[in-house]
Amino acid sequence: MAPLNYDGQTLTSLVGNSIFDYADALSVRVPTSCGRTGECHECIVEIKQGMDALSPHTDAEAFLREDYRLACQAKIVDADAAVEFAVLRRQPRILTRSVRRDITVEPHTTRDGDGVIFDGVRIDDYRGQMYGVAIDVGTTTVVLNLADLESGEILDTASFENPQRFGGSDIMHRISYDGGDFPGELRQVMLSALNFEIGELSRRHGFHRRRIYEVVIVGNSTMRDIFFGFDVQPIGERPYKSITELEMLEGKRQTTALNVKASEIGLRVFPNANVYGGPLIGSHVGADVAADMLAVSMDEEDEVVMLVDVGTNTEVVLGNRHRLMSASCPAGPAFEGGQVRYGMPGYDGAVESVALDGDGVDYHTIGDAPPQGICGSGLVDLLAELRRTGKMNELGAFEDGAREFAFVPDIGMALSRADISALAQAKSANYSGQYIVLRNYGVSPDGVARLYLAGGFANYINVRNAVDIGFVANLPEERIMKVGNASLEGATIMLLSRTLRRRIEQLAQTIQHIELETTPDFFDIFVEGCMFNPMMPMMTE
């Protein structure tokens, strides 16, 4: 029997074992979120030697070329041949930039002489530093700001992939996992990751983690509640509400916002530090969207504006400080690397932009690396370009009767009719949410002063192309603003301004939440949204 090698470590090859089995045996971390079924496209490894000793590529690996395999699919078939593999240490492009709002620094935690004061109560002796941390717990990524509570200065920003992906890549799978055989595991892995990252921040800046006196956490309803230890099963079942929302409706609490001490939940900062969970808006529209609203100053807005936070679950908020409506759109993962044959997250090597010129294709990859697949911004471009050049009709069918279109022709990377169908449905979820909220509010896109696009994916899309295929509402391009990671900015505002924290708690309770599926003509709107056209004119109610 020949050896299997990884980074100088060897094991004996056994027929039937997968590369993932050997990674486990060697304690090598290989990312996955689909239970090793090949669906998530995450466990890519490079086979440096012995490709012929492995099982043939499965259908799940059709998107891979050259010496790459999925660790869960590649199995030993010849134990007499040496095999060597390497893990691809890829990180998705994590957006840390955002719109900035000028605020008056007035945190709940202040200094009074030689004391650290929280809401009028002395909690510690002043030891030269007072820090706070704002955290945006996203389904896919987690981003933190370290702030000086005295000056309001942002000292550092850190980010990492959400380690809960083993429980599923979307919210409903996480809810199901947390209600299964291992309740609390998702919370524990997030707590461990945050404690590690906070430790890194404190070491990098040379202070003790006990100098962190306040923490703010925002996220969608599920992410926030998992962290604070709430049962999230009610969010996954009708009426799709957090326990905190249900309790507020029953008169048992005044707000969905949360305040606990760090020692109560195991967060390793100053033990008596207040840990604040931002308020929820309704159903799946969570504290991250409340933070978005603060970042773009919707609490002061008199004009009608629209906020669209694009993701696996897209959220829409429309209105001004006097009247607001919201909705949640379950778009799914098609634009984020799932359900599309060559789809992938925003890693190096992902095609991020596409332009068609005659029969030629001009594309660009993240990091200028060799193409490995195509990410969401590239898919938006490709669909818009196929429509612009007449190669694809509004129904998503190729005009020449072809079954696919090669966007990287030299290696056969193509977009198929099945891919387009998945993308049409994901796009229509975004379309339908925006359309229905606009119609219920009684305003057309022409009546919207500004459309704010929030989130990492939205930051990289070509706005004109997104409008042309109906991915976002049909507004003039100059009225559409990309605001980056507005959730992190909003969380930081909650950390540094007690006035704005209180204001968003109050505003969140006034927002009317619309359940899209209860709309009588939802199916008709969804079908219209599946077409690759700009958003149609509407009859307002």
Image (cartoon, grey):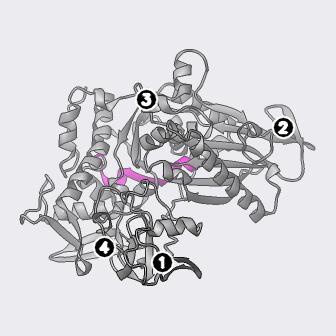
**Quadrant holding the C terminus:** top left
| Mark 4: amino acid | Pro
Local crowd at mark 4 within 10 Å, few (<14), some, or many (≥20)? some
Left or right, 541 with respect to 235, comes to: left
Which is nearer the N-term, disc 1 or disc 4? Answer: 4
Residue at image mark 3: 240
Q: Picture quarter containing residue 340?
A: bottom left
Magenta stretch: residue 158 in it? no
Amino acid bearing label 1: Phe
Give the mark nearest the N terminus, 2 or 3: 2
Is 228 drawn above or below residue 27 in the view shown? above
Front-lying residue, 139 or 47: 47
Task: Answer yes or no: is residue 115 visible.
Answer: yes
Highlighted range, magenta: 473-489
| Mark in front: 1 vs 2 | 1
User: Compared to 228, does 51 lie above or below?
Assistant: below
Q: Quadrant of residue 275?
A: top right
**In the rendered image, the vertical position of residue 147 relative to residue 359, given as above or below:** above
The reply to whether discs 1 and 4 touch (Cβ–Cβ < 8 Å) is no
81 relative to 157 in the view: left or right: left
Q: Secondary structure at mark 4?
A: loop
Position of residue 379 measured from the top left corner of the image (x, y, whole percent):
29, 62
Report the front residue among 318 and 380. 380
Indicate which label's residue lies in the foreground, 3 or 4: 4
**Which one is in front in this view, the residue at disc 1 or the one at disc 3?**
1
User: What's the residue type where badge 2 is placed?
Assistant: Ile
At mark 3, the secondary structure is loop
Residue 475 on the magenta span: yes
Residue to which mark 1 is pinned: 85
